[in-house]
Image: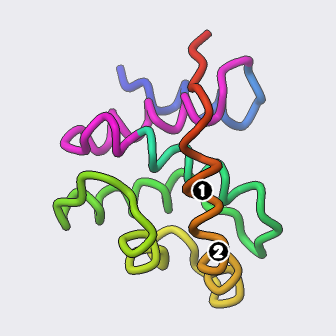
Amino acid sequence: MSKIPELKRTLTLGKPRSVTYLAREIIALKVPDLDERLRLQVARFVSALRKLELRKAPSIAETLDWARGLCALGVKELDPATVRQTLSLVVKHEDDLRKAEAKVGALLAGGGGSQVTQR
């Protein structure tokens, strides 16, 4: 039985696991070839994106699209240039894309310093 429905329900029902942890777990299940470190960076970055006032916050589907794209490109670590080149995979609206592009450095710095909790 797949863990995806359980993890998605937990994301939407606000269960006590962190959203970053759950996103990382879903990415691991759906994009198993993505490096563990990059998986965590993607989950943290998307979590930080969701805190911006975007027209449409990235869903897990967009997160998986981005993770697959990064994997296909052979990316090993998120850096500002790579994020800017691939951001349209995770952010869909042009206004949101401009807003996110302007904050890539801060989002990478802010998303990289927190611990992922597992409960």
The x and y percentages for residue 23 are 52, 38
The x and y percentages for residue 109 are 58, 52
**Closest to the observer: 24 or 84?**
84
36 inside magenta stretch: yes
Mark seen at residue 59: 1
Extreme-top residue of the structure: 119
**Closest to the observer: 113 or 118?**
113
On-image quarter of the C terminus:
top right
Q: Is residue 70 above or below residue 23?
A: below
Task: Determine the image quadrant of residue 28.
Answer: top left
Quickly name the residue at label 2: 100
Extreme-bottom residue of the structure: 94
The residues bearing labels 2 and 1 have C-alpha atoms spaced at a distance of 15 Å
Looking at the rendered image, the disc whose residue lies closer to the viewer, 2 or 1, is 2
Q: Residue 10 vs residue 89: left or right?
A: right
What residue do we see at 66% from left, 27% from top?
18
On-image quarter of the N terminus:
top left
Q: Amino acid at mark 2?
A: Ala
